[in-house]
Image (spheres, rainbow, N blue to C red):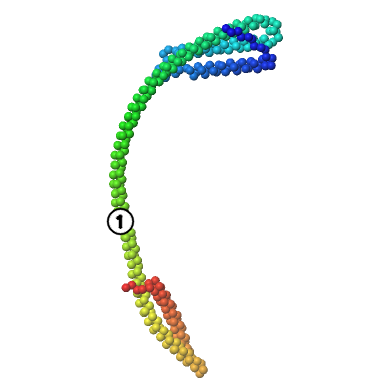
Amino acid sequence: MEYRPPMQPNRDIPQSISQIQQEQRMKFQLQQIQSKIIEERPNFQDMQGGQPPNKPWLGEDIYMVVFLLTVENDRLREENTHFQQLLNTSEMRYKGVDLVENEVISQRVKIGEYEKKLALLQMECEQWRVKYQNRDKESEDQRYQNELQRRIQVDREIRELTARFIADRNQLEQENRSLRIELDQMKLSKYSFEDNKKQCEALQKENQRLKQELDTLKKGFDELEYVLQSAGDLEQENQHLKIQIEQLQKQQQQMLQQQQQSQILQKPQSSNRIELSNSNYNVIQENRRLKDEIDRLRTLLNLGTGSYSKPFM
């Protein structure tokens, strides 16, 4: 075992800072050991086909021993550091310096022995790890072969199902095509029937409309013929009345002349005057009636000729 001289006291670093650094160093080592145990721990369920392990794994106990030894080693290192810090004080320089150095040497000897044990345990762990890696490799090859056979079988089934699906799809496409052709034919026949029905309905409506127009035209032409005939009769009557009016006007003028002559002669004749006034009044009333009748006939004539320009032939 190599002799390790004690560390020289460092008065620049206070005791609290060195203690904090030592605690951080111990935490870091503990985290490394725990992560290594978790990473190198094998999966028993994958190794034994999904079943739990029949025997406990010795490597796990070895890592636990290594962990405990490492913790003990860190504790001893911490005590060593503590003793070295005590050496920095003035009291330990004058009281029991030799005892402290001997204790430090003995602790270093123990640390060396623990390091040897730790190296042996690490070598054994490496052997176990290689052994289980080989076992995992063999089981991995077997799983690969089984997976390959399973995939070949699945591929064969997929090809058979694909061929069957293609055949069924082609048959369904042919049936669908024939059904579409029949449906198109039925639609064409339906559309042609509906078109003929619509044309018949349109022709019937047009025929009814033309019949109504023909009836209205017949009525209009009959009324026009009656109006024209009435207009001719009224025209003759109007001519006759005009002649009568002219005669009455002549008689009136003659009677006025006679009246003037009678006034000049100062021989009033009351009876003739009354008859003349009555006849004048009757002539005026008759004249008004004839004018109204003529205006009404002219209005009817204008309406008839405006609505029906040509007689029905």
Q: Quadrant of the C terminus?
A: bottom left
**Residue 96, position as x, y percentages in the image:** 67, 5
Asked if residue 242 can be seen in this view, the reply is yes
Q: Please give left or right for residue 208 compared with residue 75 in the image.
A: left
**Residue 208, position as x, y percentages in the image:** 32, 62
Please give the name of the residue rendered at 51% of the width and 92% of the height, measured from the top-left corner: 263
Please give the name of the residue rendered at 36% of the width and 22% of the height, measured from the top-left corner: 145
Pick out the residue farthest to the front. Answer: 2
- With respect to residue 191, does 148 lie above or below? above
Please give the name of the residue rendered at 44% of the width and 85% of the height, measured from the top-left corner: 279
Pick out the residue farthest to the bottom. Answer: 265
Work out whether residue 179 or residue 54 is closer to the camera in this orientation and state it.
54
Q: Quadrant of the N terminus?
A: top right
Please give the name of the residue rendered at 39% of the width and 84% of the height, measured from the top-left corner: 240
Q: Element type at marker 1? A: helix
Work out whether residue 53 or residue 115 is closer to the camera in this orientation and state it.
115
**Number of other residues with Cα within 10 Å of mark 1, as a class: few under 14, some 14 to 19, many 20 or more:** few
Residue 107 falls in image quadrant: top right
**Residue 203, position as x, y percentages in the image:** 32, 60
**Residue 253, position as x, y percentages in the image:** 46, 89
The amino acid at mark 1 is Asn
Name the residue that disc number 1 marks: 196
Q: Please give left or right for residue 52 compared with residue 110 in the image.
A: left
Residue 91 falls in image quadrant: top right
Asked if residue 278 can be seen in this view, the reply is no
Residue 55 falls in image quadrant: top left
Work out whether residue 13 or residue 174 is closer to the camera in this orientation and state it.
13
Number of residue marks: 1
